[in-house]
């Protein structure tokens, strides 16, 4: 194996990241420098440019700007308040009830919006002050908000699962969406378990038990928001529309819901559209640049060599999955989720499929794994949002984050080594 392209790729990428270069540009430039090892400058420039363009030429990717827009509409449309009120009637009277409300609300909000950032922003700003008022430490509140916000990336609809489908060469988006439900719920349940024991240990106050009338009333208020999940997933599973068409339906439904709740006015739309466009531009640039790097790595035979190296270590499925999970946990610390999925899926997918692991199962493992990276420095985007909203520092949040990290890793190991947790629902619906 010629190690020069690998050295140039890794070294140039890390150096540019260390210099503070945006991730998308670091990926694109390091891809170009790697190509220059093998071919002259003009063909290298042309190839990388073409790959960035063709990487975005996908009908499935149209779902991402629509889901981003629906997420922005939900964030502004008063949906978070109603979901929190509903969650409060369910678990508010338990030890750590407010923290559990954060987890449940984040699961519902993340599932509806498909964005960890939107969930962390909404839940942190609404529940953070309330948790402090009830005696919870600011740092614990931030830690719960940060970790629970990532559950919505596994529970559908999820933009990152669409990205995995693209990177994998066409794994069914509907199957990936259905496969994410149980792992996402397991992760949320384990986070709630940590909240329960932490609250018992710190002797945090518990809330009042809600009556059946209050539970029903809050459910009715939240029902129009929760109905979006039924419309989107029901439509996809029933074959009424594709994931891309479902994303457009989600935008229309959330817009009407915002007007119905009287939380969105016509004058708010330009700002919402501008914010969504800016987010979409960043995501699409990352996708295009990552697709070019993926192609360059394939051109240099890097995935095949890594695959051969892994299989030379062991052909035991348990060992290989453990090695891949450790690599992805490390990668997630330094790289954002979207480029990590696009770059490492072509490397690891042939390895795991060769060992008989279903691509849908591996997609859930990969996304669940990289969710942990969103909560860790130095590039954990959700970590920075959660800390900023809570008005604290990363150093202070680390201690309460640790038991929540352990819960997420336990969830990851359960999902990795019990395929039925991911594959049961897709099999049930013949996806």
Image: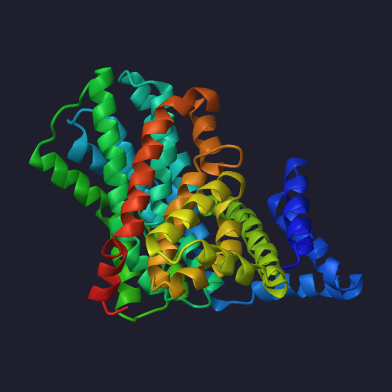
Residue 408 x, y percent position in the rendering = 37, 44
Count how many numbered circles sit on residues in the image. Answer: 0
Above or below — where is 173 with respect to 148? below
On the image, the x and y values in percent for residue 232 come to 35, 68
Q: If the image is split into quadrants, where does the C terminus sit?
A: bottom left
In the rendered structure, the answer to whether residue 374 lies left or right of residue 155 reads right
Asked whether residue 392 is in view, the answer is no
Q: Examine the image and state in which quarter residue 291 appears.
A: bottom right
Specify the quadrant that holds the N terminus: bottom right
Taking the view exactly as shown, the residue that stands out farthest to the left is: 212
Q: Residue at x 44, y 67 (%)?
A: 315
Residue situated in front as seen by the camera: 62 or 150: 150
Rendered image quadrant of residue 399 = top left
Estimate the x, y position of residue 393 in percent, counting from the top left.
54, 25
Q: Is residue 28 left or right of residue 368?
A: right
Side (left or right) of 341 relative to 426: right
Residue 4 appears in which quarter of the rendering?
bottom right
In depth, the one of 247 and 91 nearer the eye is 91
| Residue at 42% over, 54% down | 368
Residue 271 position (above or below residue 126): below
Q: Name the residue at 31% across, 46% down.
A: 188
What coloring was used for the rendering? Answer: rainbow
Observer-nearest residue: 385 or 240?
Answer: 385
Q: Is residue 60 visible?
A: yes
Q: Position of residue 410 (x, y in %)?
A: 33, 45
Looking at the image, which residue is at 49% across and 57% down?
324
**Picture layout, residue 53 above or below residue 228:** below
């Amino acid at each position: 194996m010629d190690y020069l392209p690998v050295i140039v790729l890794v070294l140039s990428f890390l150096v540019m990241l260390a210099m503070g270069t945006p991730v998308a540009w670091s990926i694109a430039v390091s891809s170009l420098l790697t190509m220059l090892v093998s071919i002259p400058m003009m063909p290298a420039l042309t190839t990388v440019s073409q790959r960035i363009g063709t990487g975005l030429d996908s009908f499935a990717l149209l779902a991402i700007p629509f889901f981003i827009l629906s997420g922005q509409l939900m964030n502004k449309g008063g949906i978070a308040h109603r979901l929190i009120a509903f969650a409060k009637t369910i678990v508010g009277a338990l030890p750590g009830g407010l923290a559990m409300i954060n987890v449940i609300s984040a699961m519902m909000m993340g599932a509806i919006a498909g964005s960890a950032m939107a969930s962390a922003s909404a839940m942190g700003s609404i529940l953070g002050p309330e948790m402090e008022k009830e005696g919870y430490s600011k740092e614990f509140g931030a830690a719960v908000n940060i970790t629970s916000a990532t559950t919505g990336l596994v529970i559908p609809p999820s933009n990152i699962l669409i990205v995995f489908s693209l990177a994998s060469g066409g794994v069914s988006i509907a199957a990936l969406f259905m496969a994410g439900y149980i792992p996402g719920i397991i992760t949320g349940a384990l986070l709630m378990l940590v909240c329960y024991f932490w609250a018992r240990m710190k002797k945090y106050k518990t809330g009042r038990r809600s009556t059946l009338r209050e539970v029903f009333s809050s459910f009715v208020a939240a029902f129009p928001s929760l109905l979006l999940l039924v419309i989107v997933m029901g439509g996809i599973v029933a074959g009424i529309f594709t994931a891309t068409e479902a994303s457009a339906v989600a935008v229309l439904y959330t817009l009407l819901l915002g007007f119905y709740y009287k939380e969105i006015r016509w004058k708010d739309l330009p700002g919402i559209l501008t914010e969504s466009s800016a987010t979409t531009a960043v995501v699409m640039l990352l996708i295009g640049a990552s697709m070019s790097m993926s192609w360059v790595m394939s051109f240099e035979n890097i995935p095949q060599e890594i695959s051969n190296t892994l299989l030379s270590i062991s052909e035991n499925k348990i060992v290989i999955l453990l090695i891949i999970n450790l690599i992805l946990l490390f990668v997630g610390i330094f790289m954002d989720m979207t480029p990590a999925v696009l770059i490492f899926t072509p490397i690891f997918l042939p390895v795991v499929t060769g060992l008989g692991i279903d691509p849908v199962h591996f997609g859930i493992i990969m996304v669940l794994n990289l969710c942990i990276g969103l909560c860790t420095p130095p590039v954990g985007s959700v970590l920075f949002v959660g800390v900023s909203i809570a008005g604290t520092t990363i150093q202070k949040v680390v201690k309460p984050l640790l038991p929540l990290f352990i819960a997420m890793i336990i969830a990851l190991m359960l999902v990795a080594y019990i395929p039925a947790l991911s594959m049961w629902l897709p099999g049930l619906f013949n996806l």
